[in-house]
Amino acid sequence: MPTALLPEPGNLKAVFIDLGVPQGQKAEPGAEYTATLVVENISDRAYPGTPVAVLHGEYQATLYDESGRVLPKKTIGGKEGQVADFDKKGTPGAKRTFKCKWHPFAQAKDGLTGMVNRDEIGKVHLETTYDDNVVSAQVNVNAVNLKAVSIDPGVSGEADPGGEYTGHVTFANESDYTFTGVPVGVIQNNQQLLTLYDEQGNELPWQEFPSGKHCQVADFSPYQIRTFIFK
């Protein structure tokens, strides 16, 4: 029997990623921006169902196609992600443009990484090189400072085993920005996350983050100092 011939490997290229921040400006922490990722198939054959993603740290943004539709999802190698079709070069569907929303973190620099057909998100097509399948961009973020001011465990000297004490922890927003949903916490013995209560004795809300971490959050007005209670 004749041996089946495998198709010649082609090449998909992550052309560029634009963060959506106006040129010459710093990004505002927590503000919403629309990023653009352009990916092109420079091969003589089509690549259907190709994994494509924009990563913001550990978080994978939701991608939209040229018509504003959310890209379909598919599980590849145990990883669920979005996929897109790429027609062969020279056709309108060879070069694709994707959009996503993102919110810069409160840190000195932040950015996004776009990728296509890579091990990190699922590789389904053979290519001549994968080095050009990833593209990144960074932007300066307006500097802010959230500060852990002090902590009082509610007891001095030796604590009685099993005794209950009321402690206080103080945080400060040293900027003119308003922050919502800021993760706050007090950890006992490097493992147990204690429950925090606000100034009125109400338990702070809990939130699960894309990393899988579950912790309490609080809001801070400009230059606000807040003290929380724990037991």
Image: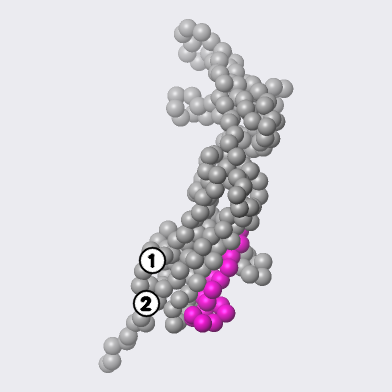
Residue 120 on image: x %, y %: 42, 58
Who is closer to the viewer here, 66 or 142? 142
Q: CA distance from mark 1 to mark 2?
A: 11 Å
Q: Which span of residues is magenta-colored?
A: 81-101
Tell me the crowding category of disc 1: few under 14, some 14 to 19, or many 20 or more residues within 10 angstroms, Cα based: some
Tell me the crowding category of disc 2: few under 14, some 14 to 19, or many 20 or more residues within 10 angstroms, Cα based: few
Number of numbered markers: 2
Q: Which residue lies under the disc numbered 2?
A: 9
Quarter where residue 184 is shown:
top right
Residue situated furthest right in the rendering: 200
| Residue 133 visible here | yes
In this picture, residue 165 sits left or right of residue 14: right
Residue 37 on image: x %, y %: 55, 63
Q: In the picture shown, does residue 183 fall above or below 140?
A: above
Query: At 58% from the left edge and 55% from the top edge, which residue is drawn?
Result: 19
Residue 103 on image: x %, y %: 61, 48
> SS class of the residue under badge 1?
loop
Q: Quadrant of the C terminus?
A: top right
Residue situated furthest top in the rendering: 157
Q: Which residue lies under the disc numbered 1?
A: 130
- At label 1, which amino acid type do we have? Tyr
Does the magenta portion include 73?
Answer: no
Q: In the picture shown, does residue 158 fall above or below 57?
A: above
Query: At 56% from the left edge and 18% from the top edge, which residue is drawn?
Result: 150
Q: Main secondary structure of the magenta part?
A: strand
> SS class of the residue under badge 2?
loop
Query: At 40% from the left edge and 76% from the top edge, which residue is drawn?
Result: 10
- At label 2, which amino acid type do we have? Pro
* Label located before the other in sequence (1 or 2): 2
Who is closer to the viewer here, 74 or 126? 126
| Residue 228 visible here | no
Residue 229 on image: x %, y %: 62, 21
